[in-house]
Image (spheres, grey):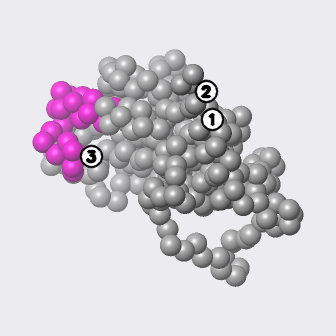
Amino acid sequence: MSGETIWLFGLPCSGKTTLAEGLVGPSTVHLDGDYLRNTLNSDLGFSKEDRTENLRRAAGVAQALNDQGFDVVASFITPYRSQRELIAEKVEDVSFVHVDAPLEVCEERDVKGMYEQARNGEIEGFTGIDAPFEEPAEEGVELAVRTARRSEEESIKEINGELGFKFDPSHIFIGRWQPLHDGHRTIIDSAADNGKDVVIAIRDTELSEKNPLTAQERRELIEGVYEDHPNVETMIIPDVDTVAIGRDVGYSVVSVPEEVAEISGTETRKQYEKSELLAGQHLEK
């Protein structure tokens, strides 16, 4: 399952990074322009050519993460239309969001004093001062968010509402799921069938007689079961020793009927392995 990318672009200090951080969910990676400038792209300057190369590399990273099933929210100035066209060519599933704020508002928000330095000639090629920001054509963006008029919460809600990007789970179920059986389903379905956003976290246990399926095999099985539930996501997590349940900290245990609680994972595994064995023998014939 491939991920998707939302590309936030706009003037410096328009609010891109703030909105990006508010959109990050359990399987989302935030690609930030400042961070990449200090790491992967530290060899690049601020000429138009270097800016374009900076974005080309970022788009490559975004697509690589999408290919591995991660969603990406990217926050880059991306001042030229040609650069946005390049990104659209490099990233298969990308939505552009123009984070739109007037220049004077961006200057007021600038706690680093970058705009002042640019106006004083201390910084050259600064977008909005002595380097252009090309306003997008309407057909070039999925959404324009005007952060001078709307609060951070309202802007994030608008992006979520229009693009349906953020996944905000209210229930997280952690287990081995070796394999997923009716007892597990009863617990998970109690939330999933009621429209709750659910994350099924799969412990990456070492292979053994008790844990015969790899984490990826279990993930594929679970995704097959819940393929018709857009409100259910899966993720693989490192193996854990303890899942703590505290009083008045928001954790709860779902009650299930006694006949469900008595379902044996070991017996389910035996039935599953027997069915796999029979299927293999049938194929050999």
Asked whether residue 43 is drawn in magenta, I would say yes
Q: Does residue 1 appear left or right of residue 134 in this picture?
A: right
Nearest the camera: 46 or 245? Answer: 245
Q: Main secondary structure of the magenta part?
A: helix
Q: Give the mark nearest the N terminus, 2 or 3.
A: 3
**Disc 2, disc 3: CB below 8 Å?**
no
Q: Is residue 87 visible?
A: yes
Asked whether residue 155 is drawn in magenta, I would say no
Q: Residue at x 54, y 74 (%)?
A: 242
| SS category of the residue bearing label 3 | helix
Q: Can residue 118 be seen in this view?
A: no
Question: What amino acid type should be assigned to the residue bearing mark 3?
Answer: Leu
Nearest the camera: 113 or 251? Answer: 251
Tag 2 residue: 282
Tag 3 residue: 36
**Disc 1, disc 2: CB below 8 Å?**
yes
Q: Is residue 32 above or below residue 112?
A: above
Tag 1 residue: 278
| SS category of the residue bearing label 1 | helix
Nearest the camera: 74 or 282? Answer: 282
Q: State which region is magenta.
A: 37-59
Image coords of residue 105 (percent x, y): 44, 47
Q: Does residue 238 appear left or right of residue 276 in this picture?
A: left
Q: Is residue 88 above or below residue 9?
A: above
3 or 1: mark nearer the eye: 1
Question: What amino acid type should be assigned to the residue bearing mark 2?
Answer: His
Image coords of residue 268 (percent x, y): 69, 52
Q: How far apart are marks 3 and 1 (CA)?
A: 52 Å
Q: Which residue is drawn at 15% across and 39% down?
A: 44
